C-alpha cells in the first residue's frame, strides 16, 4: 500500500526482533504500529493523559493497544486497504482524540495521532471527505477569503433554528456553540510597525497561529505587550513575499492533518518553514502561542517529507511559556510584574502542552507573579480536541471527558481565575458555561506594572 506520510523514521524498528510482530503490509507505517509492546500502560486509570476515550468507556478497543491490535489485523489482511474500512477499526480510530498522550506516556512512544492521520488519508482515497471535514480542514482559508462567514457563525450560535439546520446538514451539535471568530482579526502589517519598538534584548519572532489570529487576537496583542515590556524587539512571522499567496497568513497545517488531508498539510507546513527559515538563520527564536500548532511544527511536520529544514526550524521554536522560562533561567528576563487583585489561579494544561513537557515552564512563569497562588488542575483531555466536542456524534462523549475532572474542579472554585493556553480547552469550558478561561499572555499583561 502507498502511504501518505513519511514513516522512514521507523525503517529499522523491530528489525531482527522475532517478537516484533510487524504486520505483512504497510511497510514502515506497519513498523510504527508494531512499536507497541502490549504493556497495557494505556489502560491505566491514573493521572495520565492517555487514552481519553478508553478512560470514560472502558472499551479496550479505544486504548492505544486496542487500536494497535485492530490495525495489525487489518494490515495482516492480504486486502489491507479494504480491511482498513472495517467498521470496528473505523469506530476505534474515530474516537481517538489525538491527545498525543501515548507519544509521551507510552514506554514504546506509540504515536497514535499520527497513525490516525495516515488512517484518515487512506480512508479518504476510498470514501472521499464529508462537507464537514472539508469545512473544518479549510478553516484557515475560509477565514481569510470569506470573512462574511464569520457573521454566519455568530448568527448560527444565536439562532436555535440555524443551530438545528447546522446539525442536520453538517453534523454540528445543535446544543454546542461553534467557536465564533472575532469580527476583527489580528492585523500583522498594522502591528509590525508597533512591533519595531527598539529593545535591548535579542529579536524574537512571534508566530500568530490561525486560532489566535482569527478567534482571539487579543492574546497576540497581550503577548506583544509582555515581550515588549521585557525588552525584546518582536517581529511577526509573515509569508515569504515570493510565495504564491503572500497575503494569506501562515498556518502550520494542523486543521488539514486532523482530517487526513496530508497534501494540503504539507503545502501549509512548507509555507511556514520557508517563512521561518530566514529568521532562524539570523539567530532569532520563534515564539508560538498555541500548543497544537507548535507541536505540529516540532513533531508532526517531521513526517511530511520536507527535509532537514523542518528540523532546523523546529529546534528554534518554543511555546510562549517555554521561551519566557528559558530566558528566565538564562537571567535575561526581567518583567515588571505586580500582584493581582484575585490571588488564586487554576491552570489547565492542553494535552499537547503536556506532550511537549511545557507544564514545567508554565509553573516557572506563573511563579514570577508576586503573591500569586496557583494550582494545576489534575485532569486529562478536556474533550474538545479540535472539533471533536462540537460534532453531533461526539459531543456527549466530549462532555463526559470534561466531567471526569476538569469541570468539577472549575465548579469547586468559582471565584478563581482560570488559565488555559489551549484554544480548544478554552472553547470547551466556555461551551459549558464558564467564561473565565484566558491565556497566560493575558494574565501576564494584567500583572505588568501600570507604566507598561
Image: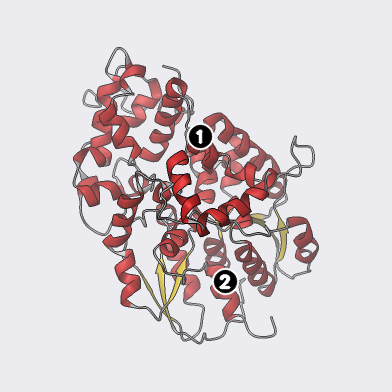
The structure's colour scheme is secondary structure
Q: Quadrant of residue 28?
A: top left
- Between 204 and 130, the one lying in front of the other is 130
Q: Residue furthest front?
A: 161
User: Quick one: 303 or 265, which is closer to the camera?
Assistant: 265
- 74 relative to 343, above or below: above
Give neighbour class at mark 1: few <14, some 14-19, many 20+ (Cα, 10 Å): few
Q: Position of residue 305 (x, y in %)?
A: 55, 30
Label 2 belongs to which residue?
A: 442
Note whether 420 is above or below 241 in the view shown: below
Which quadrant: the N terminus?
top left
- The location of residue 129, given as percent across then percent down, is 48, 29
- Asked if residue 73 can be seen in this view, the reply is yes
Q: Residue at x 66, y 59 (%)?
A: 183
* Residue 286 visible in the current orientation: no
Horizontally, residue 417 falls left or right of residue 266, namely left
Left or right, 189 with respect to 230, comes to right
Residue 179: give x, y in percent of width and height.
Answer: 51, 55
Q: Is residue 228 above or below residue 427?
A: below
- In 3D space, how far apart are the residues under numbered discs 1 and 2 (Cα atoms)? 35 Å
**Counting residues from the N terminus, which is met first, the one under dot 1 or under dot 2?**
1
Q: Tell me the quadrant of the picture where the C terminus can be found.
A: bottom right
Residue depicted at x 54% and y 74% = 443
- The residue that disc 1 covers is 131
SS at mark 2 in the image: helix
Q: Which mark is residue 300?
A: none
Amino acid at each position: 500500500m502507498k502511504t501518505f506520510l513519511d514513516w522512514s523514521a521507523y525503517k529499522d524498528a523491530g528489525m531482527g526482533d522475532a517478537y516484533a510482530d510487524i504486520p505483512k503490509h504497510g511497510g514502515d507505517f506497519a513498523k510504527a504500529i508494531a512499536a507497541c509492546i502490549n504493556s497495557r500502560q494505556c489502560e491505566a486509570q491514573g493521572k495520565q493523559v492517555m487514552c481519553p476515550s478508553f478512560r470514560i468507556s472502558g472499551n479496550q478497543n479505544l486504548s492505544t493497544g486496542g487500536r494497535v491490535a485492530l490495525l495489525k489485523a487489518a494490515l495482516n489482511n492480504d486486502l489491507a486497504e479494504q480491511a482498513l474500512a472495517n467498521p470496528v477499526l473505523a469506530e476505534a480510530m474515530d474516537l481517538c482524540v489525538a491527545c498525543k498522550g501515548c507519544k509521551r506516556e507510552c514506554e514504546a512512544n506509540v504515536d497514535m495521532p499520527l497513525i490516525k492521520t495516515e488512517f484518515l488519508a487512506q480512508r479518504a482515497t476510498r470514501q472521499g471527505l464529508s462537507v464537514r471535514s472539508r469545512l473544518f480542514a479549510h478553516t484557515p482559508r475560509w477565514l481569510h477569503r470569506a470573512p462574511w462567514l464569520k457573521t454566519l457563525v455568530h448568527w448560527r450560535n444565536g439562532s436555535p433554528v440555524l443551530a438545528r439546520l447546522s446539525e442536520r446538514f453538517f453534523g454540528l451539535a445543535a446544543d454546542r456553540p461553534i467557536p465564533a471568530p472575532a469580527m476583527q482579526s489580528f492585523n500583522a502589517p498594522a502591528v509590525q510597525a508597533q512591533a519595531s519598538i527598539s529593545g535591548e534584548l535579542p529579536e524574537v519572532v512571534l508566530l500568530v497561529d490561525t486560532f489566535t489570529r482569527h478567534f482571539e487576537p487579543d492574546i497576540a496583542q497581550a503577548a506583544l505587550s509582555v515581550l515588549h515590556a521585557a525588552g525584546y524587539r518582536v517581529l511577526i512571522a509573515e509569508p515569504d513575499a515570493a510565495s504564491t499567496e503572500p497575503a494569506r497568513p501562515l498556518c502550520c497545517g494542523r486543521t488539514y492533518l486532523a482530517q487526513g488531508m496530508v497534501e494540503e498539510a504539507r503545502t501549509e507546513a512548507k509555507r511556514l518553514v520557508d517563512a521561518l527559515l530566514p529568521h532562524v538563520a539570523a539567530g532569532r527564536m520563534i515564539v508560538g502561542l498555541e500548543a497544537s500548532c507548535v507541536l505540529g511544527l516540532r513533531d508532526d511536520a517531521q513526517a511530511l517529507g520536507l527535509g532537514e529544514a523542518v528540523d532546523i526550524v523546529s529546534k528554534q521554536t518554543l511555546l510562549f511559556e517555554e521561551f519566557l522560562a528559558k530566558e528566565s533561567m538564562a537571567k535575561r528576563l526581567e518583567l515588571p510584574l505586580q500582584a493581582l487583585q484575585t490571588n488564586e489561579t487554576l491552570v489547565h494544561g492542553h494535552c499537547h502542552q503536556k506532550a511537549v513537557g511545557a507544564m514545567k515552564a508554565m509553573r516557572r512563569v506563573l511563579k514570577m507573579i508576586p503573591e500569586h497562588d496557583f494550582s494545576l488542575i489534575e485532569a486529562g483531555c478536556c474533550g474538545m480536541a479540535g472539533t471533536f466536542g462540537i460534532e453531533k456524534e461526539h459531543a456527549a462523549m466530549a462532555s463526559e471527558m470534561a466531567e471526569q475532572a476538569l469541570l468539577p474542579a472549575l465548579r469547586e472554585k468559582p471565584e478563581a481565575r482560570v488559565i488555559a493556553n489551549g484554544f480548544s480547552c478554552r472553547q470547551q469550558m466556555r461551551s459549558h458555561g464558564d467564561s473565565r478561561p484566558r491565556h497566560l499572555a493575558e494574565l501576564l499583561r494584567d500583572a505588568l506594572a501600570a507604566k507598561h
